[in-house]
Amino acid sequence: MKKDSLIYRILMWIFRYVALSVSAAVLFYILFSLVFSTPEEKRLQKENRLYEERYNAMVEKTALIEDVIANLQVKDNDIYRCLFKADVPSADDGAHPEKGDAVSSARLMEKARGIDAAFEEVFALAARSKDSIPPLSLPLHDYSYVQTGASVGLKYNPVYKLSVQHNGLDMIAPEGSDVLAAARGTVTSVNMSRKGFGNTVEINHGNGYVTRYCLLGDVLVEQGSRVKQGQRIGTVGTSPSLPSPHLHFEVLHDGRFCNPVNYFFASVTPEEYARMLFLSGRTEQSMD
């Protein structure tokens, strides 16, 4: 009996020792993990903090981008109404089929017929009036958004040293660069002068649209002559009173000055167009 009792006590002592050792090891590991971090854990913790900072910055940038997109959408809608004298068609109209139904070929054919009818109406309008298309081409070759200056609005004038109404777009270009007609039309005025806007050509494109090309060097057209879209009508000039050579380009519709950048969207990429809009609106000083 004594021998059995001794064995039992030894086994219990061993069990308690093992249990206490395991518990101490687990507790030590937990405390070590809380106080000390492995190099991998430190790297992951650093990345997590960096991701948190970037996430907050991305949230702010996303909100800013959403505002910019909303403003561009409003601007594009205004341009559409200005150019085509109609409300902007809804992209969601009839786009969602009834629940549980796939888009059938009949509905697709119906939409295709609607698109064909719209194109036929546009072609018929163009056939009735050859001069009904607005001046959508750029008046300079290889024009980039970085060449965009001040547009229509109150701008600081470097000559008068105060803010005055600026009715066109400053398009920076080297002296002697070709100036092109933005659309076909008739030259209604050629003014040769060393004052004001200098040598100026005015073209009537019909349908109420008129373009003016100011601060020219050479003038290659005469009053009354017909010009084609993209035809050379002059060159970019310069003057001692100007900060740098550039073309002052104006677009009028029914006698009202318009922002010329609004008519560039058909000639540049969406990215270039957005940048031109941004620069022309943010530039506070004109160059003429």
Image (cartoon, rainbow, N blue to C red):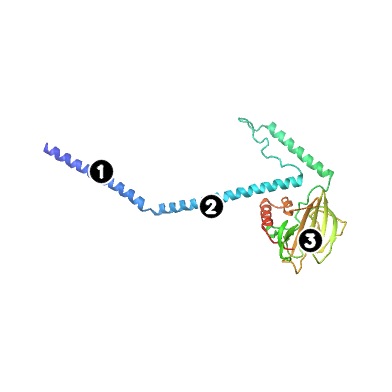
- What label does residue 5 carry, if any? none
Estimate the spatial distance between the alpha carbons at disc 3 and disc 1, rounded to whole Å. 95 Å
Q: In front: mark 3 or mark 1?
A: 3
Position above or below: 152 against 104 = below
Q: Earlier in the sequence, mark 3 or mark 1?
A: 1
Mark 1 falls on what kind of element?
A: helix
Where residue 190 appears, as percent x and y from the top left, is 85, 60
- What label does residue 19 carry, if any? 1
Relative to 283, 202 lies left or right: right
Quarter of the image with the C terminus is: bottom right
When asked about the image quadrant of residue 238, the answer is bottom right
Q: What residue did someone put label 3 on?
A: 214
Q: In front: mark 2 or mark 1?
A: 2
Q: What residue did someone put label 2 on?
A: 57
Write the residue at 85% across / 56% down.
Answer: 187
Position above or below: 113 against 256 = above
Is residue 151 visible to us here?
Answer: no
For label 2, the crowd category at 10 Å Cα-Cα, with few meaning under 14, some 14 to 19 and many 20 or more, is: few
For label 1, the crowd category at 10 Å Cα-Cα, with few meaning under 14, some 14 to 19 and many 20 or more, is: few
Estimate the spatial distance between the alpha carbons at disc 2 and disc 1, rounded to whole Å. 51 Å
Q: Earlier in the sequence, mark 2 or mark 1?
A: 1
